[in-house]
Amino acid sequence: MTCEPIGPFGPFTGDNPMRPADVIPIPEPFNGPRPSDIEFHIRKVADCVHRLNLFISHAVEAGATVELLRGSRAHNGRGQWGDQMIPIVKLPETKDSRE
């Protein structure tokens, strides 16, 4: 199957209506995500933190002690950073664990 470009360059031939595209790289004003990407990721973080807090409450109600500690810090090399957390969980002692 062969095809030729459409428009001012000529008609299609064959069954495929696609034509090759020229990709022109356009430099970004900075090497970071676009503002809409940032807002999306902030909403995802907020949603996950809300769910994490809900599950921490459930674990505490079930008898566990939960503490979050910073395990590491993610850096992007452009001045922004984010803390990454590690849960520390202490379970209550049971009669079986004392024997």
Image (cartoon, rainbow, N blue to C red):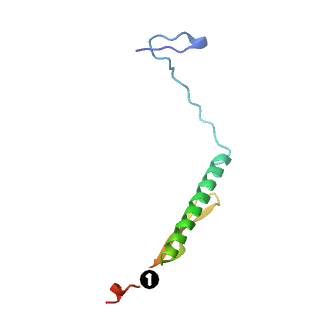
Q: Secondary structure at mark 1?
A: loop
Pointer 1 residue: 92
Would you say residue 68 is visible in this rendering? yes
Q: Please report the residue visible at 51 percent of the width from the left and 11 percent of the height from the top.
A: 12
The vertical placement of 25 against 29, above or below, is above
The vertical placement of 41 against 75, above or below, is above
Looking at the picture, tell me which residue is in the foreground, 89 or 23: 89
Q: How many marks?
A: 1
Image position, residue 10 (x, y; %): 55, 10
Point out the image quarter for the N terminus.
top left
Q: Please report the residue visible at 50 percent of the width from the left and 13 percent of the height from the top.
A: 4
Q: Amino acid at mark 1?
A: Pro
Image position, residue 30 (x, y; %): 66, 48
The vertical placement of 95 against 79, above or below, is below
Name, please, the residue furthest toward the bottom: 99
Which quarter of the picture shows residue 78?
A: bottom right
Q: Residues within 10 Å of mark 1 (few under 14, many from 20)?
A: few
Point out the image quarter for the C terminus.
bottom left
Q: Please report the residue visible at 62 percent of the width from the left and 59 percent of the height from the top.
A: 46
Would you say residue 71 is visible in this rendering? no
